[in-house]
Image: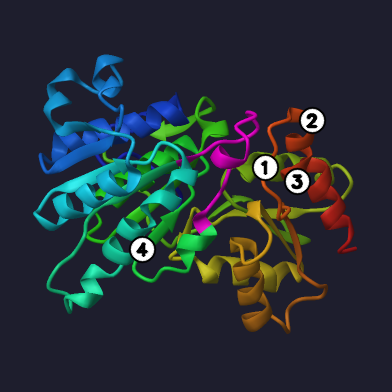
Amino acid sequence: MSGEAGAPADGSGEIREISYFQAIFEAHQEEMARDERVVLIGEDISLYTRAGLLDGSLEGRVFSAPIAENGFSGMGVGAALTGLRPVVDLTIASFIYLAMDAIVNQAAKIRYMTGGQASVPIVFRASMWHEGSNAAHHSDRPYPMLMNAPGLKIAVPATPADVKGILKAAIRDDDPVVVFEDNSLWFKSGPVPAGDHLTPFGVAEVRRKGSDVTLVAIGGTQGVALEAAEQLAGQGVSLEVIDPRTLVPLDHETILASVARTGRLVIVDPANRTNGAAAEIAAIAAEYAFDQLRWPIVRVTTPDVPIPFSPAMEQPLYPSVADIVEAVRKLQ
């Protein structure tokens, strides 16, 4: 099932080119108009209505909070327990560390701890800052940590269509969802269906079909992965590029079916290497597709270092086209 293709649910058939950033707020606007229980909580977010990102009539459901991430995340959990459907804007993904108690100890566990008597329909938005000299405190990609917390759903959308579709699906979900946005994608445009467009959880998207190597690329690495695939195609190497879209739940079937066809797997992840999403995908392939693999699995990740402020030092850390091409060459 594709996040890019298919006519809108309203039957209009219209597909527009809009930016990733526009798609985020289109999802907010539509869901708040559809369901009066949807509210937004975060620091300094009253600017959403003042700047025209949301309709002014929604101002009473946009709650600007002090810079206290665990406080307003806890406020969101409480709001969800009383029947609202809050979207908590954490601004920068690194701020998740300050809200870990509310997210991991409360939101993720309440359904289990109440024996299913209570649910927490809450969405946490976290923007991952990339290639902007944001330095160590503002440049992390902490989704691997949260993959280890049972009860949470984790999404890393890579296209405007998917960030809109995933946000809308997350808001309607009865369990907590954390949506990680790569801000390097904010102002990149792509086709987005009009109307009630939803992206399913646990369904990967094959962005490019290929026969020689399976390439699983997470989040903002989709662009460099597709560019590398194009470059290698000119050299006679066919890459199948898969976007998992959600990491919890993860679409094992699409990845394993591709590995069975190609016999080779490269995983590209902008997060740190140790205990990362790439390691989990590699483990799944090794456990369930060992007989189909014709070469060791290769990971292309950001190394296990804090992100420096200096652009000259920061840029080489992230997976690049050259890194991917080199990784694929190791499989030949």
Sequence-earlier tag: 4 or 1: 4
Q: Are marks 2 and 3 in contact (CB under 8 Å)?
A: no
Q: Is residue 229 above or below residue 25?
A: below
Nearest the viewer among 65 and 22 is 65
Sequence-earlier tag: 3 or 4: 4
Q: In the rendered view, does 240 fall on the left or right side of 199?
A: right
Mark number, residue 104: 4
Quote the CA–CA distance across marks 4 and 2: 36 Å
- Specify the amino acid type for callout 3: Ala
Q: In the rendered view, does 104 fall on the left or right side of 180?
A: left
Q: Position of residue 71 (x, y in %)?
A: 27, 46
Q: State which quadrant residue 202 falls in.
A: bottom left
Residue 309 shows in the view? yes
Residue topped by disc 1: 307
Mark number, residue 265: none
Sequence-earlier tag: 1 or 2: 1
Residue topped by disc 3: 229
- Specify the amino acid type for callout 2: Ala
Q: Residue at x 37, y 47 (%)?
A: 166
Q: Is residue 269 above or below residue 43?
A: below
Name the mark nearer the viewer: 3 or 1. Answer: 1
Sequence-earlier tag: 2 or 3: 3
Residue topped by disc 2: 312
Q: Position of residue 311 (x, y in %)?
A: 73, 29
Magenta stretch: give its range: 127-143
Nearest the viewer among 38 and 76 is 76
Residue 11 shows in the view? no
Quote the CA–CA distance across marks 2 and 3: 26 Å
Residue 298 is inside the magenta segment? no
Q: Secondary structure at mark 4?
A: helix
